[in-house]
Image (spheres, rainbow, N blue to C red):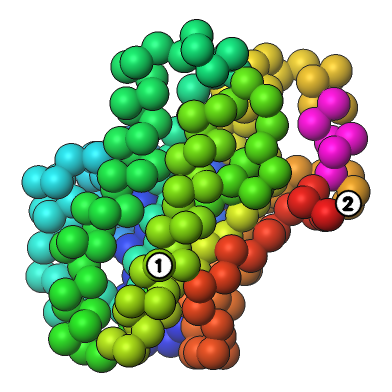
Amino acid sequence: MPLEGKTAIVTGGGSGFGAGIARVMAREGARVMVADINEAAAQAVADEIGGIAQGVDVADGASVAAMTAAAMDAWGRIDILVNNAGITHMPAPMEDVSEADFDRVLAVNVKSVYLTAREIVPGMKAAGAGAILNIASTAGLSPRPRLNWYNASKGWMITATKTMAVELAPAGIRVNALCPVAGETPLLKSFMGEDTPEMRAKFLSTIPIGRFSTPQDMGEAAAFLCSDAASMITGVALEVDGGRCI
């Protein structure tokens, strides 16, 4: 159990990739806080894995501070942070995406990484150890048209991962990213615009392995990168994409 004794916060842990990451990390021995804006969904996953649930709006500083305080009250330390919570806008020409949608995508996908770092990095520095995992996307490496501002937010996350890794390495903190292709999550329909057999076939035709990423895929990769087995790995954006970016 490579995460035995570790504590982990997984944002957006109530569904999709986040739930898969929370499940695998718990299986591998971690004590997990399932944090989600949908507190009922977070509680359901936490009950399943023997973790704790926390309602959080990752775009709100006070909410992120409360999440951090709850984790510290429960455990006294935070070993692993998974910035998984994310949203997209519906496929559209870049100039047609509303300002409100743009602001929300940047708040949830970008500002959240700053907010969690502001609250959690000081404790990791004091401990001289920690692992942060940002859930980016192949959209940040090989963008699809009509998802422009979502693509850009994930490209930002990849760059943020690398600069965080460089700055935090001397403090004993590793920072990595995962880049999944579209997966069987609540966001799939939003990426495609419509969930039809024809649209699924179109997306799958771009993935050499021939299937979408699954929450289990993400969980296995996340558990490895956050474990001591990956102690020499920092600043990577690992593609978990069935060959999509080749």
x, y percentage for residue 119? Answer: 16, 62
Question: Does 117 appear above or below 61?
Answer: below
Which quarter of the figure has residue 230? bottom right
Tag 1: Cα neighbours inside 10 Å, few (<14), some, or many (≥20)? few
Horizontal side of 31 relative to 183 (left or right) equals left
Q: Amino acid at mark 1?
A: Thr
Magenta stretch bounds: 202-207
Q: Element type at marker 2? A: loop
Q: Do the numbered discs 1 and 2 sit on residues whose CB atoms are within 8 Å?
A: no
Looking at the figure, which quarter contains the C terminus?
bottom right
Q: Element type at marker 1? A: helix
Tag 2: Cα neighbours inside 10 Å, few (<14), some, or many (≥20)? few
The residue positioned 47% from the left and 58% from the top of the image is 159
Residue tagged by mark 2? 209
- Is residue 6 in sight in this rendering? no
Dot 1 or dot 2: first in sequence order is 1
Q: Amino acid at mark 2?
A: Ile
Could you tell me how far apart the alpha carbons at marks 1 and 2 are, in whole angstroms?
Answer: 31 Å
Q: Is residue 79 covered in magenta?
A: no
Residue tagged by mark 1? 163
The residue positioned 77% from the left and 16% from the top of the image is 196
Horizontal side of 145 relative to 19 (left or right) equals right
x, y percentage for residue 115? Answer: 22, 53
